[in-house]
Amino acid sequence: MNADEVNILTKRALRADIESLRKIVNFLSQYNVPIAKFAIYSIIYQFAMNNVIDLGKECETCGGKCCKAGYPVPVYDYDFKEMKKNIKNLRLEKKNGFYLLPRPCQFQKGWICTINSFKPYACLSYPFATEDEQEDLLKSYDGNGVPDFRVPEFCIAGKKVKEFMNKIMEDLRKEKGREPTPTELLEKIISLYERKG
Ligand code: SF4
Ligand code: SF4
């Protein structure tokens, strides 16, 4: 798989396509290196954030700060094509191989994203699977256990996800009497998603 194929598969996974989720985790599991393990945990955490844990209240209280300030959001060609299907007059500046969506984002109304069902990969990945937030941590990650993901102080939704996932890991440790594998964590999160309906 090339980088775009990996990103497109991850994007589908983050949008609750379970087959894609298992496929991308299996693909990354072949590589026994810290960066691949880090990516697996990032995807599992982000999947839980997007699809398992109810965070509407937290994001409303925060007011949508992640879309208001910061570097422009990268929009890859595959994101742009999808957005263009829905926004006929979409025009974005292109730099270094990808389009840029400046913040504050033109698609935010109040705290809500008005293009939620076709927002770019980078938005679906915030904050656990974004390079901006996790770059330093990734450099020091040695492949042992769940990374202590960085979440900005203002991101109360991300903090709630970390607490939720810590509890899930604790329960799995008790149940198994050892450190759970990333795949065991993944299957637990999928079962919670399916139970949610
Ligand atoms: S994801 Fe975090 S930063 Fe973004 S709106 Fe929700 S709480 Fe705020
Ligand atoms: S596209 Fe949506 S999620 Fe992404 S920055 Fe804009 S408002 Fe936020």
Image (tube, grey):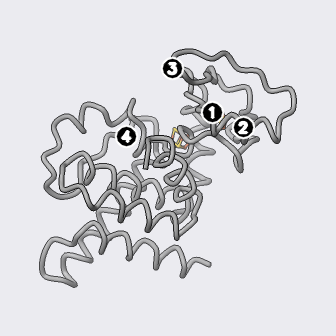
Q: Nearer the viewer, residue 22 or 45?
A: 22
The secondary element bearing badge 2 is classed as helix
Comparing labels 4 and 2, the label whose residue is closer to the camera: 2
Q: Position of residue 110 (x, y in %)?
A: 72, 35
Amino acid type at mark 2: Lys
The secondary element bearing badge 3 is classed as loop
Classify 20 as above or below 137. below
Label 4 CB less than 8 angstroms from ligand 1: yes
Residue 77, which numbered label? 1
Residue 81, which numbered label? 2
Instruction: Tell me what residue is drawn at x 55 percent, y 46 percent.
Output: 124
Q: Is residue 192 left or right of residue 120?
A: left
Amino acid type at mark 3: Tyr
Instruction: Give the CA distance from mark 2 to mark 3.
Output: 22 Å
Which residue ends up furthest to the front in the rendered image?
1
Q: Which residue is mark 4?
A: 151
Q: Nearer the viewer, residue 69 or 36?
A: 36
Q: Position of residue 103 (x, y in %)?
A: 61, 22
Amino acid type at mark 1: Asp
Q: Is residue 188 left or right of residue 194?
A: left
10 Å crowding of disc 4: few (<14), some (14-19), many (20+)? some
10 Å crowding of disc 1: few (<14), some (14-19), many (20+)? some
10 Å crowding of disc 3: few (<14), some (14-19), many (20+)? few
**Does the residue at mark 2 contact the one at mark 3 (Cβ under 8 Å)?**
no
Instruction: Give the CA distance from mark 2 to mark 1.
Output: 6 Å
**Does the residue at mark 2 contact the one at mark 1 (Cβ under 8 Å)?**
yes
Q: Quadrant of residue 113?
A: top right
Q: Which residue is mark 3?
A: 71
